Amino acid sequence: MKGLKFILAGILFGIVMSKSEAISWFRIQEMFRFQSFHMYGIIGTAVVLGTLATFLIKKYKLRDYQGNPIVFTPKEKAVSRYLIGGIIFGLGWALTGACPGPMFVNIGHGYWAIVLAIGGAIAGTYTYGVIKDRLPH
Amino acid sequence: MLELLRQPWPWYTSGAVIALVMVLLLFFGKSFGVSSNLRTICAACGAGKNVAFFDFNWRSQVWNLLFIVGAILGGVIASQFLSTGEAVQISPATIEDLNQLGISAPAGMQPAELFSLEALFTVKGFLILLLGGFAIGFGARYAGGCTSGHAISGLSNLQLPSLIAVVGFFIGGLFTTFVLLPLFF
């Protein structure tokens, strides 16, 4: 089954998000109050190792499991969309204590209230799609 | 071994596994980014008929929907089999700050003041989760990614736009933490 490997990668992600407590509203509050190194350590380690891995993939022109080159699409150059969009995202991140990945992991923990936040996130995504041409990018 | 896994994991193991997940997806020919699933869900529900932004071949993104199915299962496995059930060990300073807002010290992963069903059926509790979720969905698409797409994948690829987005995440998060939350609570 072709899709199984994505489910397994997701399971690994869900477990690590849980065991590192990154799905906890408390941990996100602690991060935004600069009262612990924990979340910075998680993100920092992931970025340092991720940067090394990305560098090596590019340097040795590594290929994916089907033999296709692994390509990294550069993000389009702009400022306003990243800054304004990022600020709006951050408002919600600190309110719900969950970003899009941990939202789903929380369902697995039986925190059913998060389904409302997911519904809100889908509505927010839809609203963006409707008005995107009228926003500065 | 199982006892060790059941303890909360130190940050460096978690960071390493997140990087591993990103690399796994690259070798699967995909890229790590969870928030695009929200757009895929809109498209799969038929939003493409009315709104051009959702008019794309969403079936090519089913792999990412499977990833979040896995993430939910990972949450089930972690909470049922890999948990000691103890409270999140946040710093005493945070506990004290949150106490002043009327949020009690952690008993599990999430504060009952926000995530219990009783809280959900209050106007305040309902609006916090709904509007918070709305801002996450709207902001992530506007910025072209969330924590996984920008903070992990984008920064790992040394993308300046991702750095700008992450700075934005923090401006918004700090505003909520120090201005909005004291107003709400």
Image: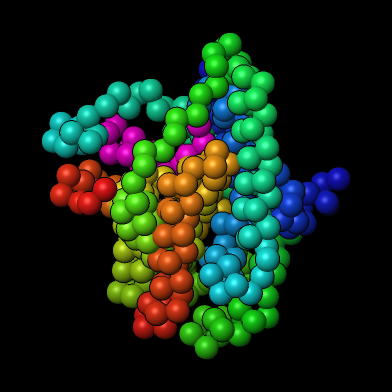
> Vertically, is B131 above or below A119?
below
Question: At which x and y percent is residue B129?
Answer: 37, 64
Instruction: Give the residue displayed 68% in from the left and 42% down from the top.
Output: A49
Question: At which x and y percent is residue B128?
Answer: 36, 69
- In the picture, residue A86 is in which quadrant? bottom left
Q: Depth check: B36 or B156 in front?
A: B156
Compared across the picture, whether B8 is left or right of A69 comes to right
Question: At which x and y percent is residue B50?
Answer: 13, 36
Residue extent of the magenta highlight: B31-44
> Vertically, is B60 above or below B42?
above
Q: Main secondary structure of the magenta part?
A: helix
Question: At which x and y percent is residue A34?
Answer: 60, 72
Instruction: Give the residue displayed 66% in from the left and 70% down from the top.
Output: A36
Q: Depth check: B5 or B94 in front?
A: B94
Does the stretch in magenta take in B57? no
Tell me if residue A103 can be seen: no
> Vertically, is B43 above or below B118?
above
- In the picture, residue A8 is in which quadrant? top right
Q: Residue furthest right?
A: B1
Compared across the picture, whether B30 is left or right of A46 comes to left
